[in-house]
Amino acid sequence: MEKSKVLVVGGTGYIGRKIVKASLEQGHETYVLQRPDIGLDTEKVQMLLSFKKQGAHLVEGSFSDHQSLVHAVKLVDVVISTMSGVHFRSHNLLMQLKLVQAIKEAGNVKRFLPSEFGMDPALMGHALQPGRVTFDE
């Protein structure tokens, strides 16, 4: 089976780091979007460097720079967004639309998994912690 080229957006988050690890373990060529707004968050910088040591490619991209997102997306055929779905804290779900626009423009992505794929808060009464807090709020 042919391996995919996978871009993980939100790769330093709670779910994202697990997706990056699993993608690398499965042998996929894995890219992690490195946003300039991580600033001096040493934990995230160390995690990104750890991913790089494990074989992931870091690709710079910003939601305020459309062309940088298009460039990142053109490198892969699968995009997995693990951005926080907690819209009242960060509005990341609305930012995800910028990622969708970049995917459309790039025209090469075969599969896109958005962070809220398959989630309907009304049907998530069985959700477990720590994710449950999102649905409770």
Image: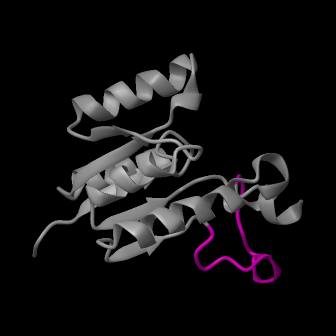
Q: Magenta span: helix, strand or loop, mainly? A: loop
Residue at left 50%, top 51%?
66
The picture quadrant where one finds residue 118 is bottom right
The answer to whether any part of residue 18 appears in the image is no
Residue at left 85%, top 54%?
88
Q: Is residue 19 above or below residue 77?
A: above
**Residue 120's spot in the image, x, y percent?**
73, 80
Count of picture labels: 0
The answer to whether any part of residue 60 appears in the image is yes
**Residue 76's spot in the image, x, y percent?**
27, 60
Residue at left 70%, top 61%?
94
Residue at left 11%, top 72%?
2
Task: Read off the magenta span.
Answer: 116-130
In the image, is 134 to the left or to the right of 63?
A: right
Question: What colour-coding does the image apply?
Answer: one colour
**Residue 111's spot in the image, x, y percent?**
37, 75
Look at the image and say whether residue 87 sits in the magenta stretch: no
**Residue 126's spot in the image, x, y percent?**
74, 75
Look at the image and say whether residue 125 sits in the magenta stretch: yes
**Closer-to-camera residue (85/77):** 77
The picture quadrant where one finds residue 107 is bottom left
